Image (cartoon, rainbow, N blue to C red):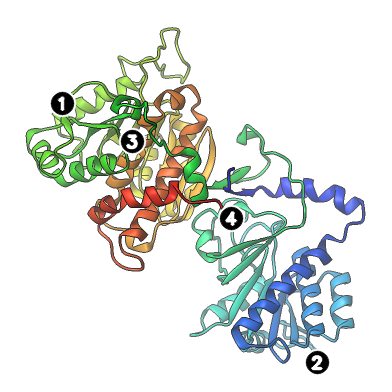
């Protein structure tokens, strides 16, 4: 049974809520009860008791603020010392009445007249002195950055040397709920409680770093299925974002049976490395070998070939039968021999002058079963034709994606890609027709099979050669399921996400909590995969 996490567009959440609200189901009170229960657990765990705990709830004008007001009332009823900081002129009237009836103090962040007006410096001091700070400023219906007093208050809190534990309702206020952008100041949440469903911004970078721990509050919503065509979805982000979990590995990873030989298990062809960069070839081939390929063929110059065979004597040098290709790690686009090998392998994917895949992206009548999936990385990205097939997986980092899109008419920098990873990965997929795996602390995969976001990699994995290892792992998966990948290209994005998951887990296995090298990740792959495919569902 699949255990993957799904984040959904706000239009799907609203569609699920409408019939329940029409029937009088008190969704706000139900959500508040669950949030308050979790807050009680946090307070007991952090200070031993709820009674006397200082809780500050930041409340904005919408339903998210209404949730916060109801949470404030419930926590006051459990003996906490609760203060609501009202940011702006309006709040949810029913929630406000409930909070006041429970004896909750309501203060304003503005500096106007009245005993309840704290001013922003006073509001920031109150927030920073809390045992628990609840962020209920903006919810999933918000767009754009925090503005006005909300932005100013968050900036004051961010400037402090120490901050209280922050519990966010639905999302950390100010993130790009639909697309994962960070358009302005955001108060990072120590824990985010998503009510009813997760928003895409909780899984997509860079916003995801502000919500490292997310829990779902189950409101028994019947969320409608995702639309098949994302272009028809009325949002700036994806209709859904999927994240594979460890329990999903066993269902998809190619595990051999007693009737399999090396060819049925999959042969990976690798075009990687040059005399100047033989290590890229060694790492890519090593990852394919140790992630379970039936055979690995290496195609390249004599010097990197010698290094590959010295490290992995089971590798077969030279051309021959291949089920999937990995092209480009450590390849210099000016190296004529390797560029020729890249072009020949792309032809086997149905691309190029000898390929079956037309520039328009439409299959011609001569298509046959000889098409091979291909991973295109680093130096091979420059060799791509204008249009690709979805079983071609591009694996750029942000700088490489900026160059790739620049060659196709976009004007952007690495920083632009890092600010809006989903947008530009989606754009690359649309322009090329390929499946795109954009590498980063959180890896984003976009293709016909949907949008995936994987965040298993530790920060230590930002190291030379890590991308070569990822390419080799993905090559193994595509080779083992090559025919399915071509016939059902929606599978390719899932395989790319699976490779990212295993790659990240292997880095942690190699040295939990500490530095890793790409070679250490290669060595950790066999035991990581064994542990994942034998893991029982929790």
Q: Mark 2 and mark 4: span between their CA atoms?
A: 38 Å
Whichever of callouts 4 and 3 sits on the residue coming sooner in the sequence is: 4
Tell me the crowding category of disc 3: few under 14, some 14 to 19, or many 20 or more residues within 10 angstroms, Cα based.
Answer: many
Which residue is label 4 attached to? 201
Whichever of callouts 1 and 2 sits on the residue coming sooner in the sequence is: 2
Numbered mark located on residue 318 in the image? 1
| Residue 230 in the figure: left or right of residue 390 | right
Nearer the camera: disc 4 or disc 1: 1
Nearer the camera: disc 3 or disc 2: 3
Residue in the image at 48% along x and 38% along y:
252
Which residue is label 3 attached to? 475
Which residue is label 2 attached to? 115
> Which residue is at the far top?
365
- Answer with the quarter of the image where residue 196 lies: bottom right
> Which residue is at the far front?
258
| Residue 461 in the figure: left or right of residue 146 | left
Tell me the crowding category of disc 4: few under 14, some 14 to 19, or many 20 or more residues within 10 angstroms, Cα based.
Answer: many
* Mark 4, secondary structure of its residue: helix
Quadrant location of the C terminus?
bottom right
Q: Are marks 4 and 1 in contact (CB under 8 Å)?
A: no
> Which residue is at the far right?
23
Q: Mark 4 and mark 1: span between their CA atoms?
A: 46 Å
Q: Are marks 2 and 4 in contact (CB under 8 Å)?
A: no
Q: Mark 3 and mark 1: span between their CA atoms?
A: 17 Å
Tell me the crowding category of disc 1: few under 14, some 14 to 19, or many 20 or more residues within 10 angstroms, Cα based.
Answer: few
């Amino acid at each position: 049974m699949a255990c993957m996490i799904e984040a959904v567009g706000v239009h799907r959440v609203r569609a699920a809520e409408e019939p329940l609200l029409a029937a009088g189901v008190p969704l706000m009170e139900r959500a508040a009860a669950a949030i308050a229960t979790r807050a009680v657990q946090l307070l007991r765990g952090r200070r031993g008791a709820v009674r006397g705990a200082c809780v500050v709830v930041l409340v904005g004008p919408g339903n998210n603020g209404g949730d916060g007001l109801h949470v404030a009332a419930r926590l006051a009823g459990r003996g906490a010392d609760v203060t609501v900081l009202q940011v702006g002129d309006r709040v949810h009237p029913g929630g406000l009445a409930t909070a006041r009836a429970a004896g909750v103090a309501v203060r304003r962040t503005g500096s106007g007249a009245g005993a309840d007006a704290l001013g922003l410096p006073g509001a920031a001091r109150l927030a920073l002195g809390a045992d628990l700070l609840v962020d209920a400023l903006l919810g999933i219906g918000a767009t754009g950055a925090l503005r006005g007093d909300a932005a100013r208050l968050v900036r004051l809190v961010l400037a402090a040397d120490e901050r209280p534990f922050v519990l966010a309702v639905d999302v950390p206020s100010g993130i790009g709920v639909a697309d994962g952008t960070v358009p302005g100041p955001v108060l990072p949440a120590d824990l985010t409680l998503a009510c009813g469903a997760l928003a895409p911004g909780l899984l997509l970078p860079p916003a995801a770093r502000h919500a490292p721990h997310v829990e779902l509050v189950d409101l028994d919503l019947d969320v409608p299925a995702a639309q098949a065509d994302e272009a028809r979805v009325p949002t700036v982000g994806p209709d859904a974002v999927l994240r594979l979990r460890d329990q999903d590995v066993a269902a998809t990873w190619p595990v051999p049976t007693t009737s399999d030989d090396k060819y049925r298990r999959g042969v990976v062809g690798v075009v990687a490395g040059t005399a100047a960069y033989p290590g890229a070839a060694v790492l890519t081939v090593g990852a394919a070998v140790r992630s379970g390929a039936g055979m690995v063929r290496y195609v390249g110059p004599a010097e990197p070939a010698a290094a590959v065979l010295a490290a992995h004597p089971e590798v077969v040098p030279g051309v021959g039968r291949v089920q999937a290709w990995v092209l480009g790690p450590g390849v210099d686009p000016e190296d004529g021999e390797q560029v020729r090998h890249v072009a020949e392998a792309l032809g086997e994917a149905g691309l190029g002058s000898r390929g079956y895949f037309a520039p328009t992206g439409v299959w011609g009548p001569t298509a046959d079963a000889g098409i091979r999936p291909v991973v295109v990385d680093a130096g091979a990205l420059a060799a791509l034709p204008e249009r690709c097939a979805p079983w071609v997986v591009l694996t750029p980092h942000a700088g490489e994606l900026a160059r790739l899109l620049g060659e196709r008419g976009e004007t952007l920098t690495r920083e632009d890609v890092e600010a809006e990873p989903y947008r530009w990965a989606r754009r690359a997929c649309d322009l090329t027709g390929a499946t795109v795996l954009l590498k980063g602390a959180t890896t984003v995969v976009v293709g016909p099979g949907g949008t995936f976001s994987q965040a298993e990699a530790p920060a230590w994995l930002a190291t030379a050669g890590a991308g070569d290892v990822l390419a080799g792992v993905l090559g193994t998966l595509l080779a083992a399921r090559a025919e399915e990948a071509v016939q059902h290209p929606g599978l390719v994005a899932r395989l790319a996400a699976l490779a990212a998951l295993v790659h990240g887990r292997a880095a942690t296995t190699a040295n939990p909590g500490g530095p890793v090298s790409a070679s250490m990740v290669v060595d950790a792959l066999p035991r990581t995969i064994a542990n994942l495919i034998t893991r029982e569902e929790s």
